[in-house]
Amino acid sequence: MDKEILEVLKDLSFINAVIATELIRITENTALIAKKPEDKVKKCAVEHDKLGEKIIELVEKYRPTATALLKTHVLKH
């Protein structure tokens, strides 16, 4: 594979990780605004945290130096 194409794919993987983790938080916030039962929202938050960790783990394979900010933002949210 062309090195330039590979770099673009790595960048896109990182961008998709940012989008995915932000969408997870939007879902949580929307549930809170919609006054969903707090116990359900908290249960989902735990699962969302695990998803965030997995997303970071996957993107670290391709952009290890670029994930520090994403990791800090997602895991401290």
Image (cartoon, rainbow, N blue to C red):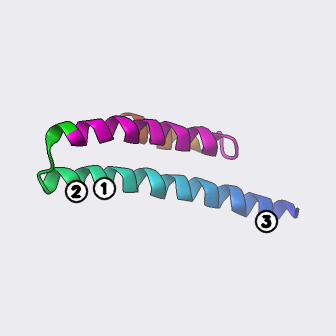
Q: Do the CB atoms of the residues marked 1 and 2 lie less than 8 Å apart?
A: yes
Residue at (14, 57) in percent of width and height:
34
Q: Nearer the viewer, mark 3 or mark 2?
A: 2
Give the amino acid type for the residue marked by disc 3 in the picture: Ile
Q: Nearer the viewer, mark 1 or mark 3?
A: 1
Q: Do the CB atoms of the residues marked 1 and 3 lie less than 8 Å apart?
A: no
**Residue pointed to by mark 2:** 30
- Badge 2 crowding class, 10 Å Cα cut-off, few under 14, some 14 to 19, many 20 or more, is few
Q: Do the CB atoms of the residues marked 3 and 2 lie less than 8 Å apart?
A: no
Mark 1: secondary structure: helix
In the image, residue 54 lies at what x, y percent? 54, 39
The magenta segment: 40-65
Residue at (31, 41) in percent of width and height:
44
**Residue pointed to by mark 1:** 26
> How far apart are the two marked residues, 1 and 2, measured between alpha carbons?
6 Å
Q: Is residue 24 at least partly visible in the picture?
A: yes
What is the number of the mark on residue 53?
none
> How far apart are the two marked residues, 3 and 2, measured between alpha carbons?
37 Å
Q: Please give left or right for residue 46 compared with residue 17 in the image.
A: left
**Residue pointed to by mark 3:** 5
Residue at (28, 36) in percent of width and height:
43
